[in-house]
Image: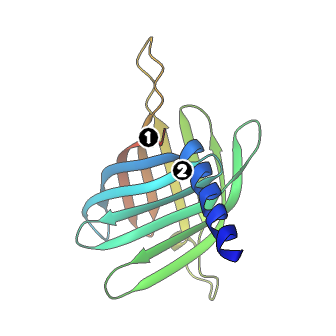
Amino acid sequence: MKEILRISNFITLFLLTSVFGYFNIGVGYNYGIINNWTIRLGYEESGVAINADYTIGKLWNILGGIYFSTEIGFEVGPIVYASYDLANFAIVYGPMVGFQNKQLAVQIGYVSNFSTFSNLSDNIFAKLRFYVPDPQGKKMIDKLYIEGQYYKGNFKILVGLLEPYF
């Protein structure tokens, strides 16, 4: 009986994410302490996002969060930012506030492991995403975006596509 329940939970979760979510793919460049090309894979839905950025030959950055939105576009919620290279794995988390509409998404957060107090500028995370408008007279189901991210001296600029599963 437990196996049937687990399988049904998996199928329900899979159907919900595949029907309502977006598959996120992108490419960009990371400037700052680490300079190299970045490839993005992820999943986004209204209120939930998880993206993995691979800086080629260097490290993985995984950013995820759960966002609660208001009717006028303000968002608040926790975010988790993990970094992994062959020698180190670090995970930080914290609160985020943001604003989103059809053309623009802005998020600012304070991420830390909260074990010690460190320099405030090292813990600020900021993301600005601009959605490219649809061509005149066309209604597109996918979303093309240009995104800039800042965290710990690294500035990342990405061009990506949110592609619905169906």
Which element carries disc 2, helix, strand or loop? strand
Residue 131 pos. (x, y %): 47, 35
Name the amino acid type tagged 1. Glu
Q: Nearer the viewer, residue 42 or 2?
A: 2
What residue sits right under mark 1 in the picture? 163
Name the quadrant containing residue 10: bottom right
User: Residue 77, which numbered label?
Assistant: none
96 w.r.t. 142: above or below: below
Q: Nearer the viewer, residue 164 or 118?
A: 164
Label 1 crowd bin: few (<14), some (14–19), many (20+), radius 10 Å? some
User: Residue 44, which numbered label?
Assistant: 2
The mark that comes first in sequence, 1 or 2, is 2
Residue 46 pos. (x, y %): 63, 46
Residue sitting farthest toward the front: 1
7 horizontally vs 137: left or right: right
Residue at the location (59% across, 48% down)? Answer: 45
Label 2 crowd bin: few (<14), some (14–19), many (20+), radius 10 Å? many
66 horizontally vs 119: left or right: right
Q: Nearer the viewer, residue 18 or 138?
A: 18
